[in-house]
Amino acid sequence: MKENLSREEFLKGIWRDNPVFAQVLGMCPMLAVTNSAINAVAMGMATFFVLVGSSFLVSTFRHLIPKQVRISCFIIIIATFVTIADYTLLALVPKVHKELGAFIPLIVANCLILGRQEAFASRYPTKLAVMDALGMASGFLLALFSLGAVREILGDGALFGFNLFGANFEPWVIMILPPGGFLTLGVILLFFNWFKTKKDEFLEDVAAAQRSEG
Amino acid sequence: MKKRDPDLLLFHAPLLRQGMTTPSAMRDVVWALLPATAASLWFFGISAVLVLASSIAGAVLAEWLFANKEARGESLRDSSGIVTGLLLGLTLPPGLPLWMAFLGGFVGICLGKVIWGGLGHNLFNPALLGRAFLQATFPIAMTTWVPATGDAGFFAIYPGNLALPFMQVSVDAMTSATPLGLMKFEQVVTPLNELAFGKINGSLGETSGVALLLGGVYLWARRDLDWRIPVSILATVILFSACLGLFDAERFPTPWFSVFSGGLLLGAIYMATDPVTSPVTPRGAWIFGIGVGVLVMLIRVFGGLPEGVMYAILLMNAATPLIDRYTQPRVFGRGIESP
């Protein structure tokens, strides 16, 4: 039972409650830094680290944090991890850090992270909170990567910098520019919702068939 | 079966029916575009056929793909996809790779019509939206203007047309600027008779002003377009450039040059008058037309681009719901203080 519960918390973030495709949270980094797959993945990893770390701390200290000042406490905890992530990226991959620019400090303001602290980590035991954070962060990483991959493939003819189409590829300039982010996200959301509707219809049909049999 | 007595037939109102339906209005637009299409074949040969066919194919495919299964035949029968594809095709450069024309038609219908809820619900003109997408996506290919085929004959295909999907052709095509580009960047004025009858560089449909006007007169005679919109657009452009001419006749285009160059006639007659995306009230139509005219001249004369008809119409499309709301006629008997 316990195992199932934490597994459930992990899986819901990847698909059913995916922070981007289902909750439409964290749009700022989602649209701003997904112009190439490597930027998207770097952003996703940084957010992953911050979300898991702060969920762990918030959940551990959830009885010690006074209710009236909880938001500022969350922000301080998140900001600590963001600073660590910022300097780590700067040390390890300075080029990517330069491209992401202001969006790394802005992870502090990512509504996905603060939302998980407020809605989940401050109310549940540490183990569940960490599982939830892992799931949500993986879902966010997945969404960032899919957006970044589509935009880099169409906009540059490459993936992670590897040329896929040869020299004569005609780049779709719009895909690297901000409108491309909106267009790609819109199309992906469209397919996500379409799939969901189809699945719900299918489940209803199955349930109806079972009722009529029984 | 017993023959019914005509005197006893019962109908709901309305009892009078107009002959005009969506399919017939759409067919009228296709007929009206025939002179311009024929002119594009005359100047650009088989390439024109290929580009137009590709963009129509893209539009119709999207229409078919995203229609409800039950309404599939219906949405194809009203031929609005064909009109969108044809209009888009006429705004494209003749040497454009065919896959781009196809993509433009497809995106125009998808983003311009289907996601808004289908015919009659869209905010922007689908053909222009498709073109705006292409312009933003492939800025170089969309501004590569090849000269008319001329002596090479009808069956000479521009090398650019045959690029494989997602690829470009590395052959250097012979290119030259449009009259508007020449005017803006090199201060060369193209004579008016060339502008009116074609034989200039530009997109497929915009080269022959007279052919476009012919179609416009046909549409007006068939009551398919609101004459206020093209008239107010053209009048605004003429007035605007006449005023500019007072300041510096050398630097600014003459009124007739402004009217006959670029896509102004094509846009004013066929795109701005799209009944879905233009205001329904007569007063709104005037405001809409004047807005388009002013924006076209502002972009052409003071903006960075040589041509601005597409953006002018799209911007005014966005303002259409607002215009409609503020120009609603007063309901009879309402809003008057009783004596």
Image: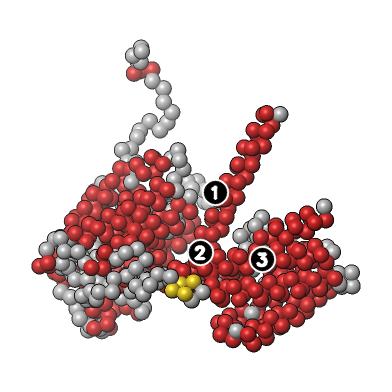
Image position of B95 (left or right of B314)? left
Q: What is the quadrant of residue B270 in the picture?
A: bottom left
In this view, the mark in front (1 or 2): 2
Residue at the location (18% across, 75% down)?
B190
Q: How far apart are marks 1 and 2 (CA)?
A: 57 Å
Is A161 left or right of B188, judged from the image as shown? right
- Give residue B44's position: percent from left, percent from top: 18, 63
Q: Residue B158 carries which label?
A: none
Expressed as whole percent of the image width and height from the top left, the position of residue B84 reads 34, 54
* Amino acid type of the residue that numbered disc 1 sits on in the rendered structure: Ser
> Badge 2 is on which residue?
A184
- Of labels 3 and 2, earlier in sequence is 3
Q: How crowded is mark 3: few (under 14 residues within 10 Å), some or many (20 or more)?
A: many
Quarter that holds the N terminus of chain B: top left
Task: Name the residue located 59 percent from the left edge and 86 percent from the top edge.
Answer: A94
Q: Which amino acid does label 3 sit on?
A: Ser
Label 3 in the same subunit as label 2: yes
Q: Is residue A103 above or below residue A12?
A: below
Disc 3 secondary structure class: helix
Decide if residue B2 is on the left or right side of residue B39: right
* Other residues around mark 2 within 10 Å, as few (<14) / some (14–19) / many (≥20): some
Farthest top residue in view: B2
Q: Name the residue under label 1.
A: B338
Which secondary structure lies at badge 1?
loop
Q: What element carries label 2?
A: helix
Residue bearing mark 3 = A138
